[in-house]
Amino acid sequence: MPSRLHQKALEDLGSRIVNGTLPVGHVMLAEQLESELGVSRSVIREAVRVLQSLGLVQSTKRVGIRVQPRSDWNPYDPLVIRWRLRGNNRGAQLRSLTEMRVAVEPMAAELAAEYASESVAEELHDIANKMRSAGQDARRFLELDVRFHSVVLAGSGNEMFAKLHDAVEEILTGRRDMGLLPAHPHEEAVQLHMDVAEAIAIRRPAEARGAMNEIMRQTIAEMQQEWAQIPRGTDAG
């Protein structure tokens, strides 16, 4: 029960901060939140602790809990990503995340082809084959897709790339929840994942990079209408 209440309070406050209902500079008092959300002080304290770790709020004695500017937020945290994707300006968030993937994942595939162990290459081949076998099971395909990209990021040997796996999982899951994934996996997409796995297995960095880059370009083509009318530099909510 405490865990459920904590999650409810965290989701409520985090979502309202990210979508601007609780604007920058707004000050909340713990006792007010207790009454508003119908939870205990300890639940509020724990939710605020998490929000503070994300940069969304700053809690100060005798002042209260102040909403922080977006420049203080941790944009890579899965919770922040999830709330932003549910917010009023999800297109800007989709653009930022997709452009990050375009910049990072082809390089990760190239590095994996140079440095990944044989076990990593074998795992990628296994996942790609299972993606093909998933057929019309979109949910299973998504699970495998998340795993595939996570293994490539980790297989790069770059610990900063590897840490992006949660962000990649969040955007892929978010696309499903928003109806922005194809109802059925495209054969071309499946083949490109096979191509990445094969290039990594036979140590061909340029081919691995090229195949992953094509996956990313297809991703942009599928979603760019979501941000087509949003000026660059818009403060995403």
Image (cartoon, rainbow, N blue to C red):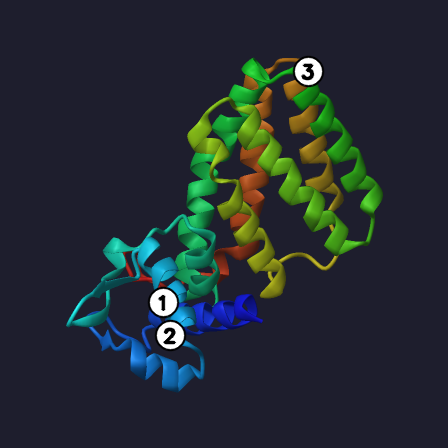
| Element assignment for label 3 | helix
Q: Residue furthest bottom?
A: 35
Q: Quadrant of residue 43?
A: bottom left
Can I make out residue 209 in this image?
no
Q: CA distance from mark 3 to mark 1?
A: 47 Å
Residue at x 51%, y 49% (from the top left corner): 220
Q: Quadrant of residue 177?
A: bottom right
Residue neighbourhood size for the residue with mark 3, other residues' Cα within 10 Å, grouped as few (<14), some (14–19), many (≥20): few
Q: Which disc, if any, is residue 118?
A: 3
| Element assignment for label 1 | helix
Against 139, is 133 above or below? above
| Residue 51 x, y percent position in the rendering | 35, 61
- Asked whether 63 or 215 is in front, the reply is 63
Q: Which disc, if any, is residue 41?
A: 2
Which residue is tagged 1? 45
| Residue 58 x, y percent position in the rendering | 24, 62
- Asked whether 5 or 220 is in front, the reply is 5
Q: Amino acid at mark 1?
A: Arg
Label 1–label 2 contact, CB within 8 A:
yes
* Marks 2 and 3, the one that precedes in the sequence: 2
Marks 3, 1: nearer the viewer: 1
| Element assignment for label 2 | helix
Give the left or right position of residue 163, taking residue 176 as reference. Answer: left
Q: CA distance from mark 1 to mark 2?
A: 6 Å
Give the left or right position of residue 157, taking residue 71 as reference. Answer: right
The quadrant the N terminus occupies is bottom right
Q: CA distance from mark 2 to mark 3?
A: 52 Å
Residue at x 54%, y 53% (from the top left corner): 170
| Residue 116 x, y percent position in the rendering | 59, 18
Can I make out residue 120 in this image?
yes
Residue at x 76%, y 43% (from the top left corner): 187
Give the left or right position of residue 202, taking residue 46 as reference. Answer: right
